[in-house]
Image (cartoon, rainbow, N blue to C red):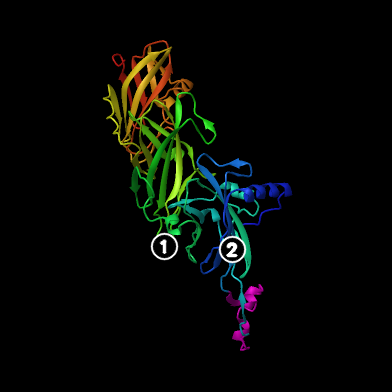
Amino acid sequence: MYNTLKSRIFIFCFLFFLIYYVSDGLAGSDEKASNKAVSVKIIKSATVHEVSGERASKGRVFLILETEWENIHPKQKVEKDKLEGKTDRTMGVSTLAGKKKKKTEYVEADVAYMVEKLFDHAYLVADGLAYPIHEITESVPEGVALKESFTIAKQGEKRKAVFVYSIPESAENLGFQFFDYQYGHVLLPVQGDLKTARGSDKAPGEVLDQIQTKMVEIATHSVDFQNAHAGDEAPGGWQYVVVQLSGKSLSGKNVKDIVQIEPTEYTWISTEGGYLYYASGGSTTEEGMIRFTPEIFQHQELAFLVPKSEQVHQLGIRLRNDVFQLKLSDSKPKAKPKAVASHRDGDIMEVMVFGMREEDGKVIMDLGIQSLATSGIEIQRDAQFMIVVNDEKISLDDSLTDELPHRSPSPFIIPPKTFVRFELAYETEGTPTDFYFRGYESEATLNLSDKK
């Protein structure tokens, strides 16, 4: 159950409400709606740029929504003995002995209204997109707990709940959407036109590309290039590629499920030449997930650390063992170069050598892997890729490799049926004569004498 918040320090409460009420806010309208079990009323809403010392990110504001919930579930008749916790200790003996059976008494009892996690059910809809409760909600007075149940025990009992949402500063039409598949959904206007706020079954706004499976529908909307993201500065020569996308869960039948994706392992950017860069973050939960609600497209953001010299082409998404590529630009990527040497490791993958170069006491191998498998392939780069110098096998240098713009992806997992190009660095003064590869089904030694 969602417990009521513990007592707060008076000064903290005062400072919060000072920020809340002196900001330019949205007028309280006392809008009210209900389903068969609960009634929800919006008391007040306001947009602010700072809550509890945290400032909204660029182009966004915090929407503070103060609500009141009332349990209106009809009382139900229950056996009085069961309600009082009494049990039948006769095991039916008195009835068999011919004694008169006691008449069952019924009484009306309250039915508690409970939501396991409001985080999964209560959304702010803005111009056709759904936005989840911001975690800062837990730090404000009467803010709901995100990981505990929310309960209203008795009919007629009321409970206040404050939600904080991070939304675009440009949003014009706002609504409060509460999902309840047992008693009915609740939708309330906050600002502007409610129908526009909730949106249609289509992804809103400009769409670069879109995919649909039995599980989820996802659309890409825009790509931005930034020198910093979420407070982290990009290293010299690198930048963050930030992709704005939306998605809607199609999973489930009568009750739709929320679809979750771990972006640092299952989403990536593909650049010219076939290089792959996994997501470094985005609008994720504390568990590191991006989520897509049922029925309404939910806004999400993904960030990728990519060299500034790279031309971005596609967003890759792996859903279980299916891989999808969503275009991020109108330009088409060039075909992969012709390999100067290759080896097929059974039905798992094909390893390709595109060339090598020597610079500053190190050898850099230009390599590629084409997955032939229907599941992801985990690569151990130091154990599987070696160069041979003077009949000695030399493993790669981790630190030198990680400094390369075209370093191997991290985690080094090749998505199913996907091509990935990368470079590995080896510290050696000698010139390699061979490239050694240890696969899962075979091993091979490829001659490098004429592959510079």
Q: Amino acid at mark 2?
A: Trp
Which x, y percent locates residue 139? 63, 48
Q: Amino acid at mark 1?
A: Asn
Stretch in magenta: 75-101
Give the residue number, with chain letter if any, for mark 1: 254
The quarter of the picture where the C terminus appears is top left
Mark nearer the viewer, 1 or 2: 2
- Out of 360 and 142, give the one closest to the viewer: 142
Disc on res. 322: none
Q: Secondary structure at mark 1?
A: loop
Q: Secondary structure at mark 2?
A: strand
Give the residue number, with chain letter if any, for mark 2: 69
Residue drawn at x 59%, y 76% is: 78
Q: Where is 245 relative to 414, above or below?
A: below
Which x, y percent locates residue 404? 43, 22
Residue 94 lies in the magenta stretch: yes
Q: Is residue 79 visible?
A: yes
Residue 265, by quadrant, is top left
Residue drawn at x 69%, y 53% is: 6
Q: Is residue 131 left or right of residue 375?
A: right
Residue drawn at x 32%, y 24% is: 444
Which x, y percent locates residue 238? 45, 27
